[in-house]
Image (cartoon, rainbow, N blue to C red):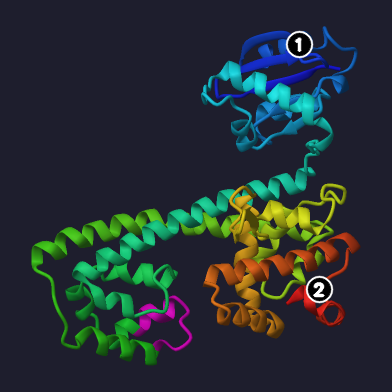
Amino acid sequence: MIFVGIDWADKEHEVCVLDQDGSELAHFRIPHTRHDLETLKKQLLRYVTSPEEAPCFLETSQGLLIQFLLEAGFPVYPLNPKVVDYRRKPSGAKSDTIDARLLADIGRSDLRRLRRLNPDSELIQELKILCRDQDILLEEVTRLTNRLTACLKEYYPVALELFSRLTLPVTLNFLKTYPTLEAARSASVPELAAFLKAHRHPKPNLTAQRIYAQLHAPQLEARPAVVRAKSRFMLVLIAQLEPLLEAIKKYDEEITRLFKSHPDSLIFASLPGAGTRLGPRLLAGWGDDRGRYENAAAVQALAGTSPVLYQSGKYRFARQRRACIKFLRRALQLFAYQSVLKVSWARDYYQRKRTAGKTHHEALRALANIWVRIIFAMWLNRRPYDESVFLAARARHAPSVA
């Protein structure tokens, strides 16, 4: 058996090959091309008879390099970059050559404690990528919405009070139709009612009267130069927002389709408050490989919900776990917040944590930690959420839950 450390990069990868005694068999650099990766495969197979005897150790779990190694039959072991940092010499020297050697050496000495990468099914992989990419689009919408809000506050603040949400199609179309206060004031009540009817507003006549009154109420007005400049900027922001909102809607449709086609969707859809956004994200972050996690504690660590104990002498405290899967941690904390709104025991637990002096996010993480144990049991047994089952289990183990 040999041990292959690969310090990956965008264009070239540093490779170090060690034997079982830790002696270096080879050290080379390969470009990131299909031809050169095939060369890598041939070079590694010079030392072993099968790819299974050449485990590869990298600081990533995704990408085309990982895909190539898995398809070629090489065992892949992703390592946390912090693990490599801890193994550096006191001098702190760092280079691609050193990192590749460290990766191979860590794999050689700790192989039994490392977890081999077992990739998700194609459906889960696609669902995870779609959810993560949609999160990027949602962040962009938030950024543009904040800019649009700031822009309107400078010259047209009343527009922020006319509709319930700035990103609604009716709101954006109203701003395009009436980009200034003067333009909006020129519209009569029947015209406003006709605009609302065209957008299928549930109460167009009553709402038109309210909007007309709000527009004509005394208020601060910007100078003409400011109005001309900011109204132009407002229209540019809307032109960026609208295609993003439409794209997010399309992402929702595809994510929902993939989610419903997976048998585990029944489990995650049964979670109170998960809805159409968090249910797919929880499934994507959790995966469908029942052999991946040894127990619920492993998921709690990966999701960052369980705290990390720090103790030195008489000094002892728990701190937030930072080395985790951020995507799953975010989904679990958002779900925990939704459960506070919908589930009585979750709301009581959250309030007890707040009363004990925990911050909002600390209380949510603690609640998410409880939910991980519940979801793990549901997932392992392939059963949807049943509150009576949880309440009965909590009654049996009240001290550990509290």
Mark 1 neighbour density, 10 Å: few (under 14) some (14–19) many (20 or more): few
Residue 148 image offset from top left, x and y in percent: 32, 63
Residue 142 image offset from top left, x and y in percent: 43, 60
Quadrant housing the N terminus: top right
Residue under the point 26% across and 71% down: 178
Q: How many marks?
A: 2
Question: Which residue is under mark 1?
Answer: 23
Near-viewer residue (330 or 192): 330
Disc 2, SS: loop
Distance CA(mark 2)–CA(mark 1): 53 Å
Q: Amino acid at mark 1?
A: Ser
Is residue 313 depicted above or below 351 in this figure? above
Question: Which residue is under mark 2?
Answer: 385
Residue 231 image offset from top left, x and y in percent: 22, 62
Q: Amino acid at mark 2?
A: Tyr
Q: Magenta stretch: give its range.
A: 193-204
Residue under the point 20% across and 86% down: 216
- Dividing the picture into quarters, in which one does residue 266 lie? bottom right
Q: Is residue 258 visible?
A: no
Near-viewer residue (99 or 330): 99
Is residue 114 depicted above or below 196 in this figure? above
Ranked by sequence position, the earlier of labels 2 and 1 is 1
Residue under the point 66% across and 84% down: 348
Tell me: 364 left or right of 112. Answer: left
Q: Is residue 368 visible?
A: yes
Residue at the front extreme, as displayed:
313
